[in-house]
Image (cartoon, helix red, strand yellow):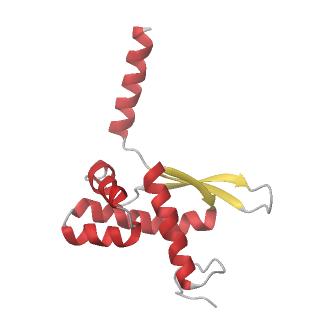
Amino acid sequence: MRHKVRGRKFGRERDHRRLLMRNLVSSLVEHGRINTTQTKAKELRGLAERLITYGKKDTIHYRRLAYKVLQNRDLVKKVFDELAPRYLSTEGGYTRVLKNGYRKGDSAPMAIIEFVEKEETLAKKEKKIKTKDLTK
């Protein structure tokens, strides 16, 4: 029995698993949403939310911890300057996992993982769309 055993192994060795998660979180930060298997998305959620929490604290120490995961200065800058300020008033729940059917080749359950947008930014986007429609 696997009582209190944390994390998923994905049939990979430790180093390969660590690189897989780094690549997935880098893609998520870069694109805002990615399509992957459900289990990978659920495992990725914790790492992505930890990076946003680092960004909210915004010190040199937390920038270095984020760089340790992302290995890209531009992505670290994006986390600290663009993503984290969105969630200053929110404690947790920065990502969402949406089920997305099954993969054709092996019927693996797929999911979309994305950053949750706050209502304020959604309201601004809707307002912009309405003003564009009115001007046309």
- Would you identify the image quadrant in which residue 17 lies? bottom right
Q: Is residue 61 left or right of residue 90?
A: left
In front of the other: 16 or 134? 16
What is the tally of numbered marks visible in this picture? 0
Spot the residue most to the left. Answer: 59
Q: Position of residue 3 (x, y in %)?
A: 56, 88
In the image, residue 132 lies at what x, y percent? 41, 16
The residue at the point 78 percent across, 61 percent down is 107
Percent x, y for residue 36? Answer: 62, 59
Q: Is residue 13 above or below residue 106?
A: below
Q: Identify the residue at the far top of this view.
A: 136
Which residue occupies the foreground of this view, 107 or 73? 73
Q: Is residue 29 above or below residue 120?
A: below
Q: Nearer the viewer, residue 71 or 79?
A: 71
Residue 79 left/right relative to 21: left
Residue 2 spot, x, y in % from top left = 60, 88
Locate the C terminus by quadrant.
top left
Residue 35 found in image quarter: bottom right
Residue at horizontal 25 percent and vertical 53 percent from the top: 88
Q: From what the image shows, is residue 62 above or below residue 28? A: below
Residue 53 as seen in the image, left or right of residue 113: left
Q: Residue at x 39, y 70 (%)?
A: 69
Between 34 and 98, the one nearer to me in the picture: 34
Q: Residue drawn at (34%, 56%), measured in percent from left and top? A: 74
| Residue at the bottom extreme of this rendering | 1
Quadrant (top left, top right, bottom left, bottom right) of the N terminus? bottom right
